[in-house]
């Protein structure tokens, strides 16, 4: 069966510091991978998605970037965090065919101080 | 106007009640409709998904899609305190690469 791992679960970072969140998927090959951010009362905002190694699509301009160095690894990064980067970050995988049902990781809660 | 509208709640019901959660949408191209449940500080988990109009039942949960009204519903029968969570609707269209568009979520509280 497929599983998705996301870490760290919680982190507190000062403004201006770098960020790296990692996501890995097991039990499937060539998944579509997604990074979402969830703000209170605002639902899930798609940040990046990837259909393959090195292929990244950005949905919104922001202070963040994503990379996919391996088939089942997806990384969310920032060189210098802003206060507005605080939030709950979710990685997900899915298939582009049919319903594209997404399976989410447990999430990473980022607080920027 | 948001593409997907969902009342944020909170919706408070007594244990055993029938719960109705709803979303409206504006884009008639949406074909797949999903409901996710999210417990506090956890990632969303898929409850059900349906294609086009109609009903789908899974245990105590029933999903309903009315494409003519651009309206979807999730019914929970015999609600339990363990159903207390945020419920997110989501939908996608093939012509937009099947990327999911989410509602903001409805907070449900089932009181024992």
Image: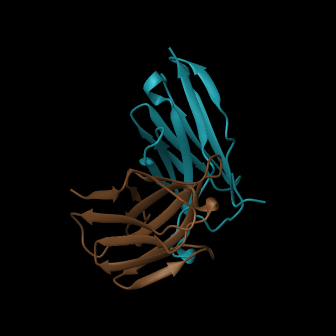
Q: Residue at x 54, y 72 (%)?
A: A80
Query: Does the image show residue A101?
Result: no
Q: Residue at x 58, y 49 (%)?
A: B65
x, y percent for residue A20: 41, 67
x, y percent for residue B99: 52, 69
Query: Does the image show residue A109?
Result: yes
x, y percent for residue A5: 30, 57
Residue B26 position (above or below residue B86): below
Locate the C terminus of chain A by quadrant: bottom right
Q: Residue at x 63, y 49 (%)?
A: B104
Which chain did the image draw in cyan?
B
Locate the N terminus of chain A by quadrant: bottom left
Residue in front for this viewpoint, A63 or B15: A63
Residue in front for this viewpoint, A30 or A70: A70
- Colour in which the image shows chain A: brown
The quadrant where residue B57 appears: top left
Residue B82 position (above or below residue B93): above
Q: Residue at x 51, y 76 (%)?
A: B97
x, y percent for residue A102: 42, 60
The quadrant where residue B92 appears: bottom right
Residue B12 position (above or below residue A95): above
């Amino acid at each position: 069966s497929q599983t998705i791992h996301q870490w760290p679960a919680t982190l507190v970072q000062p403004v201006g510091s770098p960020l790296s969140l990692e996501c890995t998927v097991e039990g499937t090959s060539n998944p579509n991978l997604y990074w979402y951010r969830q703000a209170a009362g605002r639902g899930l905002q798609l940040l990046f998605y990837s259909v393959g190694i090195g292929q990244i699509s950005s949905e919104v301009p922001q202070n963040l970037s994503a990379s996919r160095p391996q088939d089942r690894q997806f990384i969310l990064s920032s060189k210098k965090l802003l206060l507005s980067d605080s939030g709950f970050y979710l990685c997900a995988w899915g298939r582009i065919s049919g319903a594209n049902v997404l399976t989410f990781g447990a999430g990473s809660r980022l607080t920027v101080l | 106007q948001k593409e997907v509208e969902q009342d944020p709640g909170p919706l408070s019901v007594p244990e055993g009640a029938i719960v109705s959660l709803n979303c409206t949408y504006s884009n008639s191209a949406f074909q797949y409709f999903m409901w996710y449940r999210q417990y506090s500080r956890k990632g969303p988990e898929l409850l059900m998904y349906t294609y086009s109009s109609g009903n789908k039942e899974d245990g105590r949960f029933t999903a309903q899609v009315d494409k003519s009204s651009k309206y979807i519903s999730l019914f929970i029968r015999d609600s339990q305190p363990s159903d207390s969570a945020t419920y997110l609707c989501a939908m996608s269209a093939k012509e937009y690469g099947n990327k999911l568009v989410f509602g903001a979520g409805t907070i449900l509280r089932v009181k024992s």
